[in-house]
Image (spheres, grey):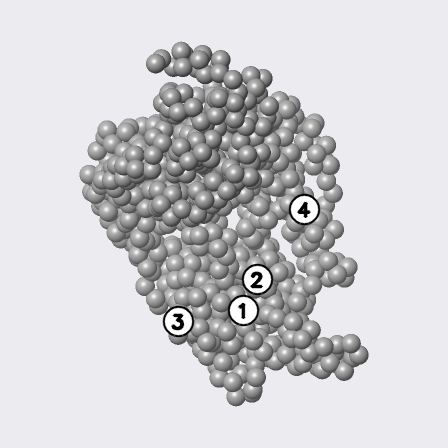
Amino acid sequence: MSFPRCALLWARLPAGRRVGHPAACSALRARVEPLPGALGRVSAVASASSSSSSASGGSKAPNTSLFVPLTVKPQGPSADGDVGAELTRPLDKNEVKKILDKFYKRKEIQKLGADYGLDARLFHQAFISFRNYIMQSHSLDVDIHIILNDICFSAAHVDDLFPFFLRHAKQIFPVLECKDDLRKISDLRIPPNWYPEARAIQRKIIFHSGPTNSGKTYHAIQKYLSAKSGVYCGPLKLLAHEIFEKSNAAGVPCDLVTGEERVTVGPDGKQAAHVACTVEMCSVTTPYEVAVIDEIQMIKDPARGWAWTRALLGLCAEEVHLCGESAAIDLVTELMYTTGEEVEVRNYKRLTPISVLDHALESLDNLRPGDCIVCFNKNDIYSVSRQIEIRGLESAVIYGSLPPGTKLAQAKKFNDPDDPCKILVATDAIGMGLNLSIRRIIFYSLIKPTINEKGEKEIEPITTSQALQIAGRAGRFSSKYKEGEVTTMNREDLSLLKEILKRPVNPIKAAGLHPTAEQIEMFAYHLPDTTLSNLIDIFVDFSQVDGQYFVCNMDDFKFSAELIQHIPLSLRVRYVFCTAPINKKQPFVCSSLLQFARQYSRNEPLTFSWLRRYIKWPLLPPKNIKDLMDLEAVHDVLDLYLWLSYRFIDMFPDANFIRDLQKELDGIIQEGVHNITKLIKISETHKLLNLESLSAENQSRLSGALKSQARRMRSTKTLGSKAMEPPTSNAEEKSLASRLVQQGLLTADMLKQLEKEWLTQQTEHGKEKTEPGTHSKGTRRKKKEPPSD
């Protein structure tokens, strides 16, 4: 009997006779059921699918906690009525609920779900959604209505629900439907093949290896200047600017390309044969005679390493000159082996001697002209600058968040032999990009906050590579000091510094990679309702890399993606906004990214006059440290505008006006930094800056370092737990303190401060116990460890 004929006769039957009619039910099920309806048949399909998947490569199981379920709304009343109820009968919701509960509890169903990628977590979430959909829908699809009716009358098995459950699960977890495609898209195992232009030529790779101030970069730049065409790729805007100026001063026309700036020296706007750029901005399709990639060891950087990998594998140059630490030689050689290119290594030695002193500075009274005190946080910068000013000395200040113009101005002030400023207070920002005339480097501390590959904050002693990079700034070949010296502020740190500097630098094991906009777009095609932040998580989880590579940390990207998620933007535009470099610790910068994206989504150009109103221009010189930090944030916002103006020219049309505004703001910031000790003094007076709390901060930093060390070393597990609790006896405290001093994590001054604070806390707790209504349980709760820095 044909289906139309069966349906017609079925429709003519009285309502009472339609229930459970076997011929009609079987004919209708055969017509409308798209998936196999028996557990045995589904099991066979699952088995075949599983064996096929394992045969095709055996990829790692995905992290299903990243799969965010989509919402499938229950069906409302249908315009055609409830067809399933008309063909059979209305469903009894109580009976249906019992059937669904029985379905959920069957082990065979759970195992079958696992074969289709539904682990216990996904299975539970899918079932809850499936049950809500069935129980809350006014009318169900005909096929599932008939199956449920048949199960109620024992004409079908509860297992026959599985195809409909699986169909629903794939609706709320669309990744289940396209796992194989997603794995292909996120396959990052052969990065050299991404750059066909570079693979089409045979490149000569020359590695200039040596420590800081060995002349390695100088020799590479000489080849760059003598070539017919060339590209310099540096890690900082300052370095790109330096090569840009040197090249043009040497009579070699050179353009400048950074994220926020494009300078073409040709009078007609024609591109020059040479270009100096930041490494992220280099072109992998333009042919050059010579390419220089500076600081190649940064290929291991957890956040930016992908840019060096891209330049190394993708630059179309006859000669590629790499400058950096010897730790990168083995990895570069292995990567070039996969491209069929050999690496020539040229080793260099330091041009001027450098020595580690046998005595620490111990007091700022012992400062001499040409000294540079290196701190690893701003509070130490402010504190040291203030103490130097109290002693009647003048100091220059350089730290990472200062604008490039201000850094150069401070460097010039320090280098000027006629300027009374003879002391420099700086962070490790001096490690690259600035030519400084330093005689002696003094490490104020050896503990530095860092971000690991997982995006977690760690507070540990500086690495050998970092120590060598900073110490190497003393006694540079081009400065007036032909011999460099290195020491520490505290006597207890000196032995640790010597140990750090003597350690061999660990070889770099892997190079960073980063998903491209095209790959994310292909992911979004398969998962159209997934947020960009979640897409990134799934991409990283699905990605496959060779042992020589790793996927860079994308926390900053995800932060921006979540920030602007609610703003309607196309995926490509959203991706570009998320790659904009911002300091997520600056609330004003983050809110500006949000505001820029909102204006863009409304198709409202961000004009010069609009931005002036937004930043409340004109701005006054800073009156305290907070004002100075606010001005630095505004400078970052102008940088963000300029960065976006080269990606969306029509929506950010006034880049030239904004650049002039930024130069004016740079001058205001320079004035503030020039008077920084006055700002610090005013801030202390108005209690805007508490430099006396630094010892407590050092204690917190020490606590964090201990936690990190305890995670890595099983033998120090007990030590770590004791370090986070109040000492119980003088003997125990002495033993623990001596070990911490030996490890370089505690100084005598810090030990005295900790002892004072402990005695103060004991006194306060003793007073609290004598107060009415105070319980010992509450007192213990107050003794919990302070949060680590």
Mark 1 vs mark 2, CA separation in Å: 8 Å
Callout 2, which amino acid? Asp
Labels 1 and 2 touching (C-beta < 8 A): yes
Report x, y in % for residue 223.
31, 39
Residue drawn where x is 35% and y is 45% of the image: 108
- At label 1, counting other C-alpha atoms closer than 10 Å, the crowd grade (few under 14, some 14-19, many 20 or more) is many
Mark 2 vs mark 3, CA separation in Å: 23 Å
Labels 4 and 1 touching (C-beta < 8 A): no
Judging by the rendered image, the residue that carries numbered circle 1 is 703
- At label 4, counting other C-alpha atoms closer than 10 Å, the crowd grade (few under 14, some 14-19, many 20 or more) is some
In the rendered image, which quarter contains the C terminus? bottom right
Number of marks: 4
Q: Secondary structure at mark 1?
A: helix
Residue 461 lies, with reference to residue 528, above or below; the image says below
Relative to 150, 685 lies left or right: right
Judging by the rendered image, the residue that carries numbered circle 3 is 714
Closer to viewer: mark 2 or mark 3: 3
The disc placed on residue 789 is 2
Q: Secondary structure at mark 3?
A: helix
Callout 4, which amino acid? Asp
Q: Secondary structure at mark 4?
A: helix
Closer to viewer: mark 4 or mark 2: 2
Mark 4 vs mark 1, CA separation in Å: 30 Å
Judging by the rendered image, the residue that carries numbered circle 4 is 630
Q: Nearer the viewer, residue 535 or 776?
A: 776
